[in-house]
């Protein structure tokens, strides 16, 4: 009996020692994090490691990313067992609909308080905020500031198509300029991004574009789209007609072949790598007097509502830290190069990134309508039609008619 008592006492002591030495590890809430962008995976691991080191009680595990197969892999995770699927996952565009039922409301986060209303459309469903944008991106007209200055043109004055055309007339005479405005030939650049101006400037775009799809009206019946087409007629002769690749478009701008290019913030890295000797900046494309940049959310972080309450709370704590804390903002701006979707949050340095952050923060943006309201297949059909327009095979009325016919064909 004495022996048994001694053994039991020893077991009890060891158990107490184990609990004390464990530092309360059993109280640590473990969450998993999966995202789609392979190019930031390594840097994001650094961010996660820093959070884990400085925050007790929560352990974040960054899962491997699968790039182009991300949505398929994520869907298989939820199909197998929603409760063990990633606690935090990134989502964007049309794939969102497949995961809506797994997205927890995030309205009670600190980050949500800093998100401007103009950037909520893509992440609000049934009046609930189901995602926190990781970053925003924007596009418009990137201009050679030195070239415009030498020609006596103030970028701020280019607030109408007529003002833009007058500037193009001057810039066309500058030595070395092949065309005042350069477009790239890829589907999204020559058509989708550019046509988005006409669609997004319609205050009732969802309703009106749906009517185009059902054949109740044509694109020419939407005033902002008709204005877009009329304005395209005015600038057409001053463009390169979209005959070069994205790489050649940006390289041509860097070499002074184009005074402006219609392009996005993602071009900044390439322009800087080309070590241009001139200053450059962003202005909106002023169709119909527009003074807003086209800004959209790259991806959004969502929280799995099938995870435990403790895990959901921990996930929100991590996201608030990443988005709103001084350390998280520094990582987001300097390491991940995220342009914040949030008011008062640090932006990465750079001519274009700072402009996008400024426009986004002030609410002077138009959305990326193509992510939600363009039928699948319009990128290909639209590119074919606008190429025919640039080749003088159809006029702008014919362009809108062909686009309307394609809208009906592709509409679901």
Image: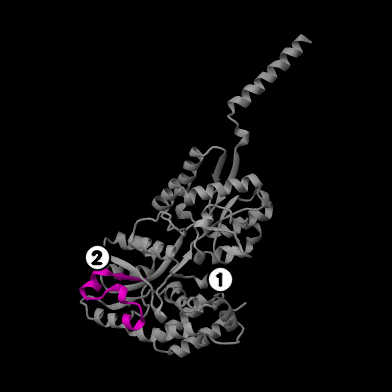
Residue 91 location (% of width, % of height): 56, 59
Residue at the spot of label 2: 278
Residue at the spot of label 1: 372
Q: Which secondary structure, mark 2?
A: loop
Q: Is residue 183 above or below residue 126?
A: below
The quarter of the displayed image where residue 9 is located: top right
Q: Considering only order in the chain, which callout, 2 or 1, is on the residue closer to the N terminus?
A: 2
Which residues are the magenta region?
141-164
- Asked if the magenta segment contains residue 9, the reply would be no
- Residue at 59% across / 59% down in the picture? 130
Residue 207 location (% of width, % of height): 58, 79
Residue 285 location (% of width, % of height): 38, 75
Q: Which secondary structure, mark 1?
A: loop
- Asked if the magenta segment contains residue 162, the reply would be yes
Can residue 36 be seen from the camera position used here? Answer: no
Measured in 3D between alpha carbons, the distance from the residue under mark 1 to the one under mark 2, in whole angstroms, is: 37 Å
- Residue at 47% across / 90% down in the picture? 398
Residue nearest the viewer, comparing 310 with 4: 310
Q: Give the residue furthest to the top.
A: 2
Residue 215 location (% of width, % of height): 60, 86
| In this rendering, position of residue 349 left or right of residue 226 | left
How has the structure been colored for display?
Answer: one colour
The C terminus, quarter of image: bottom right
The quarter of the displayed image where residue 344 is located: bottom left
Q: Is residue 202 above or below residue 83?
A: below
* Count of numbered badges drawn on the protein: 2
């Amino acid at each position: 009996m004495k022996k048994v008592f001694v053994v039991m006492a020893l077991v009890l002591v060891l158990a107490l020692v184990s609990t004390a030495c464990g530092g309360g590890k059993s109280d640590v809430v473990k969450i998993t994090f999966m995202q789609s962008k392979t190019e930031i995976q390594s840097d994001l691991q650094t961010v996660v490691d820093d959070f884990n080191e400085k925050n007790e009680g929560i352990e974040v595990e960054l899962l491997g990313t699968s790039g182009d197969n991300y949505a398929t892999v994520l869907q298989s995770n939820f199909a197998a067992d929603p409760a063990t699927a990633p606690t935090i996952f990134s989502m964007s565009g049309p794939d969102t609909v497949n995961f809506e039922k797994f997205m927890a409301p995030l309205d009670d986060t600190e980050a949500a308080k800093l998100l401007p209303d103009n950037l909520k459309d893509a992440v609000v469903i049934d009046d609930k905020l189901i995602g926190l944008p990781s970053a925003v991106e924007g596009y418009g007209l990137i201009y050679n500031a030195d070239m415009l200055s030498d020609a006596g043109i103030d970028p701020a004055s280019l607030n109408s198509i007529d003002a833009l055309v007058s500037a193009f007339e001057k810039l066309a005479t500058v030595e070395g300029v092949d065309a005042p405005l350069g477009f790239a030939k890829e589907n999204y650049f020559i058509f989708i991004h550019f046509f988005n101006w006409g669609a997004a400037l319609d205050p009732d775009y969802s309703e009106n574009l749906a009517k185009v799809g059902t054949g109740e009206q044509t694109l020419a019946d939407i005033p902002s789209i008709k204005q877009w087409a009329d304005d395209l007629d005015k600038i057409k002769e001053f463009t390169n007609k979209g005959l070069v690749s994205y790489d050649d478009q940006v390289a041509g701008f860097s070499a002074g072949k184009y005074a402006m290019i219609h392009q996005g913030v993602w071009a900044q890295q390439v322009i800087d790598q080309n070590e241009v000797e001139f200053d450059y900046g962003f202005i909106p494309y002023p169709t119909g007097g527009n003074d807003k940049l086209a800004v959209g959310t790259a991806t959004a972080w969502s929280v799995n509502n099938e995870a435990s309450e403790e895990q959901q709370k921990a996930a929100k704590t991590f996201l608030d830290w990443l988005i709103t804390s001084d350390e998280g903002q520094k990582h987001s701006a300097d390491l991940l190069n995220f342009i914040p979707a949030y008011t008062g949050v640090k932006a990465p340095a750079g001519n274009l990134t700072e402009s996008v952050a400024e426009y986004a923060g002030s609410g002077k943006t138009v959305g990326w309508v193509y992510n939600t309201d363009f039928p699948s297949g319009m990128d290909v059909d639209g590119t074919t039609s606008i190429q025919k327009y640039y080749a003088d095979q159809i006029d702008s009325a014919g362009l809108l008619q062909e686009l309307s016919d394609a809208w009906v064909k592709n509409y679901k």
